[in-house]
């Protein structure tokens, strides 16, 4: 009996190694193919040339940039490469809940996904994204990476990028967004179809509260600033 258990374990181990090797190989090929079509060093220039409304870092409200990394990737400015802490936490949460409740993707990883894989969902693509993280962080500063990210992310209601979102939702330039507006916009990309403002979804405002709380936990804003924002939320949504 022990002999067969040992043989079964060895066989399972070999199978896992073989499948992992195949996944690594196919994912790396996807990465190389994508990179050959658009070198990472040319991504920012490509995005600027193909988007008349591309908005550079200094022309974006600091509130929007801070709200974005606070809720999407709180270790964005202090980590290098893959955020193993966030990835490990996501794996634990997903296993404990027996569902995909947390992705563990960094802003850099999400940027690579949008630019190179157009939101494609597959394990192969997920692994291929990881190869891009170090390339992006070698070529660009963190400020340039988050700048590119907010210019390509989906803010719902057909708004791609921070310029369209800012103008169509609030009628103002991205640089003019205040804390309330910025935190509300930063809440949307997690689930654009659900959180887009045309839905008048109470969960959008709950997500906004999370954004604000995450900003406070990083020392970016005070409790009094959060309270001022909460006063501006629609009464119905604030009560739910």
Image (cartoon, rainbow, N blue to C red):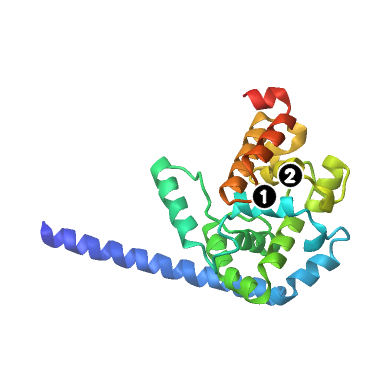
Quarter of the rendering containing residue 238: top right
Dot 1 surroundings within 10 Å: few (below 14), some, or many (20 or more)? many
In this rendering, position of residue 130 left or right of residue 161: left
State the residue at coordinates (71%, 55%): 65
**Percent of width and height locating residue 173:** 87, 50
Of the pair 72 and 157, the residue shown nearer to us: 72
Q: Please give the residue where the numbered disc 1 appears in the rendered image.
A: 67
Q: Report if the CB atoms under discs 2 and 1 are less than 8 Å apart.
A: yes
Residue drawn where x is 57% and y is 62% of the image: 125
Residue 139 image-quadrant placement: bottom right
Q: Secondary structure at mark 1?
A: helix
Q: Residue 26 placed where, x, y %?
A: 52, 69
Q: Which residue is mark 2?
A: 179
Name the residue located 52 percent from the left edge and 58 percent from the top edge.
123
Left or right: residue 77 versus residue 63 is left
- The spot of residue 75 in percent (x, y) is 55, 59
Q: Residue at x 62, y 39 (%)?
A: 223
């Amino acid at each position: 009996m022990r002999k067969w258990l040992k043989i079964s374990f060895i066989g399972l181990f070999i199978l896992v190694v073989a499948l992992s090797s195949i996944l690594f190989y196919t994912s790396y090929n996807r990465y190389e193919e994508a990179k050959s079509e658009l070198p990472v060093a040319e991504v920012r220039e490509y995005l600027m040339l193909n988007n008349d409304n591309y908005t550079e870092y200094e022309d974006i409200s600091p509130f929007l940039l801070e709200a974005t990394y606070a809720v999407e990737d709180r270790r964005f400015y202090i980590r290098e490469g893959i955020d193993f802490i966030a990835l490990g936490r996501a794996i634990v949460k997903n296993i404990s809940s027996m569902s995909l409740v947390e992705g563990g993707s960094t802003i850099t990883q999400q940027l690579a996904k949008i630019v190179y894989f157009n939101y494609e969902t597959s394990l192969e693509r997920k692994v291929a994204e990881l190869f891009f993280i170090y390339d992006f962080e070698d070529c660009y500063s963190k400020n340039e990476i988050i700048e590119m990210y907010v210019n390509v992310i989906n803010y719902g209601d057909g708004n791609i990028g921070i310029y369209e979102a800012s103008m169509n939702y609030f009628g103002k330039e991205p640089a003019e967004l205040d804390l309330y507006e910025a935190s509300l916009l930063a809440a949307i990309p997690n689930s654009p179809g659900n959180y887009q403002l045309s839905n008048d979804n109470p969960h959008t405002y709950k997500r906004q509260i999370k954004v604000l709380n995450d900003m406070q936990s990083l020392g970016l804003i005070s409790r009094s600033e959060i309270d001022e924002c909460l006063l501006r939320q629609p009464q119905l949504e604030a009560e739910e």
